[in-house]
Image (cartoon, rainbow, N blue to C red):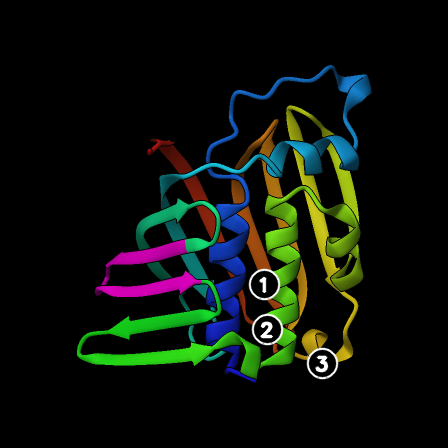
Amino acid sequence: MPNAGVFRLLSIALLAAAGLLHGGFTAAAEDWSLERLMQTLGKQSSGQATFSERKYLAVLDQPVESSGELRFRAPDRLEKITLKPRPESLVLEGNTLTVTRGKKQLVLRLSDYGEVAAFIDSIRATLAGDRATLERTYGLHLSGSAERWTLTLLPRDPRMAEVVLKISIAGTRGQLRQIEILQADGDRSVMEILAMGATR
């Protein structure tokens, strides 16, 4: 299985892709439900957004901050481009994950890592509006209203839970605003997302 850092990058980037561009959705408060949220996030689209991220690590007194862009092209290409404090890119397309830092490049076949493959399948299920597949990987809990909601994902697989304890996604209607990932070792990351618009 890839290290926790790669798993966390996948988590944030894929979840961000699930809700980049659906800000126009409206729903009456009484109609808001997990099923309605899944339908909203399941709308396939392509686009880009900016992000700022804070990583809280047990070995450091201050959070590590970074920022950059997220790009998604249906059906399965996702890029997380970190611009500050130093360039880094993560590109996921099909079964291949490519991480580039400076002159170093790491290429992984996701099919070689069962837990990660299951995780990615579950997020792609979110993009497709397939709640049943998502619930095979996570226990889901939705709180709040359409205007201010939080979706909590708890890994069902014990091996996955050894890396990630909980993922909390906050949003307004169909627009993701924040993704927080709590790792089993106590480290956590918080990403704020600002959608920039659709691309064709």
- Which amino acid type is marked by label 1? Ile
- Disc 3/disc 1 C-alpha distance (Å): 15 Å
Observer-nearest of 93 and 99: 93
Q: CA distance from mark 2 to mark 3?
A: 10 Å
- Residue shown at 61%/37% (left/top)? 41
197 lies above or below 7: above
- SS for dot 3: helix
* Quadrant of res 134: bottom right
Q: Nearer the viewer, mark 3 or mark 1?
A: 1
Residue 61 % position (x, y) = 42, 71
Magenta region, residue range? 78-93
Residue 88 position by quadrant: bottom left
Q: CA distance from mark 1 to mark 2?
A: 6 Å
Q: Foreground mark, 2 or 3? A: 2
In the rendered structure, which disc, 2 or 3, sits on the residue that comes first in sequence? 2
Are there few (<14), some (14-19), or many (20+) residues within 10 Å of tag 1? many
Q: Residue at x 46, y 80 (%)?
A: 59
Q: Please, what is the three-letter code of the amino acid marked with disc 2?
A: Val
List x then y, in percent, for residue 104: 23, 81
Q: Which residue is mark 2?
A: 116
Q: Amino acid at mark 3?
A: Arg
For the C terminus, give its image quadrant. top left
Callouts 1 and 2 close, C-beta under 8 Å? yes
